[in-house]
């Protein structure tokens, strides 16, 4: 009985006709797992180092951030794949704008609400977009197709200098515009390092 059910399910899963809708389910599952794997260690470190309140409260915040990241990514992947599939079924062909349209609608619905987790995810993507626009280094004719082409070293050096110059200016003059976690980190590095009242305090305080 069980073997028959297992065989029927396996045949259904392996049937090419079912690949498209099943890919939505698997994409959602992968989004849930990946979101948890990425967010949990990040939240664990940041909330442990810079959070306030009892350990129980901090752990609750870690779990909340992990759940928000994983569920949002899960729903986004499912929605994105469903929208791409719907466009292809309607048009009957592959359109180069499909990823943009599906990504835009998915981003509006899943990441459009201004929350700390959504803000971090969107800003991470913005950083990757900006990096993708930088000039690329020259590669040999044997560079594997599909493999990332490195950023030109000179362009990256200019980009790094402008980034750090801008972030330090904002920290000194417009810190209220920066993310709280970033400000706390920079306070530790650049403000608290100006303050001590004993040798012990100089060596170990706030380590």
Image (tube, rainbow, N blue to C red):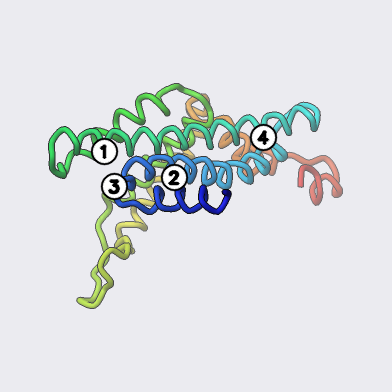
Foreground pick, 107 / 149:
107
- Identify the residue shown where x is 46% and y is 22%: 114
Residue position marked by numbered label 3 in the rendering: 17
Q: Does 24 sit left or right of 145 as displayed?
A: right
Residue position marked by numbered label 4 in the rendering: 62
Please tell me whether mark 3 or mark 4 is closer to you in this view.
Answer: 3
Packing grade of label 1 (10 A; few <14, some 14-19, many >=20) is some
- Identify the residue shown where x is 43% and y is 40%: 25
Q: Where is residue 11? Give x, y as percent.
A: 40, 52
What's the distance in space between the residues labelled 2 and 4, CA to CA? Answer: 26 Å
What's the distance in space between the residues labelled 2 and 1, CA to CA? Answer: 14 Å
Q: Are marks 2 and 4 in contact (CB under 8 Å)?
A: no
Q: Does 24 sit left or right of 44 as displayed?
A: left
Q: Where is residue 145? Give x, y as percent.
A: 25, 68
Q: Which circle marks residue 36 in the picture?
A: none
Residue position marked by numbered label 2 in the rendering: 26
Question: Mark 4 or mark 2, which is nearer the start of the sequence?
Answer: 2
Please tell me whether mark 3 or mark 1 is closer to you in this view.
Answer: 3
What's the distance in space between the residues labelled 3 and 1, CA to CA? Answer: 13 Å
Q: Kindly state the secondary structure of the residue where label 1 is placed.
A: helix
Residue position marked by numbered label 1 in the rendering: 85
Q: Does 178 sit left or right of 44 as displayed?
A: left
Question: On screen, 32 above or below 177?
Answer: below
Question: Mark 1 or mark 3, which is nearer the start of the sequence?
Answer: 3
């Amino acid at each position: 009985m069980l073997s028959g059910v297992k065989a029927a399910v396996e045949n259904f899963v392996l049937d090419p006709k079912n690949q498209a809708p099943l890919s939505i389910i698997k994409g959602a599952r992968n989004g849930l797992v990946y979101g948890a794997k990425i967010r949990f260690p990040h939240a664990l470190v940041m909330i442990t180092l810079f959070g306030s309140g009892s350990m129980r409260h901090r752990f609750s915040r870690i779990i909340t951030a992990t759940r928000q990241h994983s569920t949002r990514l899960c729903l986004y992947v499912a929605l994105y794949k469903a929208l791409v599939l719907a466009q292809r079924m309607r048009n009957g062909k592959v359109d180069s704008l499909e990823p943009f349209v599906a990504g835009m609608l998915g981003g509006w619905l899943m990441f459009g609400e201004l929350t700390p987790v959504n803000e971090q995810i969107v800003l991470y993507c913005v950083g990757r977009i900006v990096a993708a626009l930088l000039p690329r280094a020259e590669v040999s004719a044997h560079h594997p197709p599909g493999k990332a082409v490195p950023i030109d070293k000179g362009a990256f050096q200019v980009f790094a200098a402008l980034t750090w110059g801008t972030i330090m200016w904002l920290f000194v003059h417009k810190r209220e515009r920066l993310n709280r976690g970033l400000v706390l980190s920079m306070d530790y590095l650049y403000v608290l390092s100006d303050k001590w009242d004993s040798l012990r305090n100089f060596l170990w305080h706030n380590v």
